[in-house]
Amino acid sequence: MFGREPSKTKELEKELTPEAVEELAIANFIIEKYHSKPGSLIPVLEEIQEKIGYLPKHIQQAVAKGLGLPLSEVYGVVTFYSFFTMMPRGKHTIKCCLGTACYVRGGSGVLKQVEGILDIHAGETTEDRSFSLETVRCLGACGLAPVMVVDEDTHRQMKPSKASKILTQYE
């Protein structure tokens, strides 16, 4: 009646895929480094996301438990800061600018072409996790409009017809 209950982590691991169990091990290692340091939530989340690529629910639960915080606080930080993501990201991130200059010069056509090539919509990642597609409101390169950025490479004066050739460079 008063015996030890199985730990929540062990119960959670039973419900997870092998990949998720591996992610949890990575997260727990990072959490252990920071668990006694006040104000470590953001550094922990940053390091975990750097290692596994995103912050799914099971990772957020582990962070909350490991740092002694409410899950709502962890979730609030993850959803507040745009650099955190709860969805798996692709190996390459494509950003299509839809700011005024880029939009007027055909940025939406470039976006539609990229969506068609990759068979995803903005905000999604390809099934093989090769590409994530995002839209942004301004990349600060209005004189080069329309602009598409792949990882750290800026592609200027984009036309829908150029998108396919550019994307093949990253396959």
Image (tube, rainbow, N blue to C red):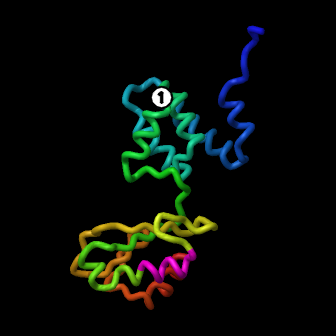
Taking the spot 52% from the left edge, 76% from the top edge, the residue there is: 170
In the picture as drawn, the residue positioned furthest to the right comes out as 1
Q: Is residue 90 left or right of residue 44?
A: right
In the rendered image, residue 34, in percent from the top left (x then y), is placed at 46, 30
The range drawn in magenta is: 111-119
Q: Is residue 14 left or right of residue 106?
A: right
Quarter of the figure that contains the C terminus: bottom right
Quarter of the figure that contains the N terminus: top right
Question: Toward the viewer: 47 or 70?
Answer: 70
In the rendered image, residue 115, in percent from the top left (x then y), is placed at 50, 77
Q: Is residue 112 magenta?
A: yes
Q: Is residue 64 left or right of residue 152?
A: right
Taking the spot 44% from the left edge, 70% from the top edge, the residue there is: 94
Q: Which residue is mark 1?
A: 70
Question: Which of the 4 image quadrants contains residue 160?
Answer: bottom left
In the rendered image, residue 24, in percent from the top left (x then y), is placed at 62, 40
Q: Is residue 126 above or below residue 164?
A: above
Taking the spot 34% from the left edge, 67% from the top edge, the residue there is: 136
Question: Which of the 4 image quadrants contains residue 78?
Answer: top left
Q: Is residue 58 above or below residue 36?
A: below
In the rendered image, residue 156, in percent from the top left (x then y), is placed at 32, 82
Q: Is residue 136 above or below residue 53?
A: below
Indicate the secondary structure of the residue bearing disc 1: loop
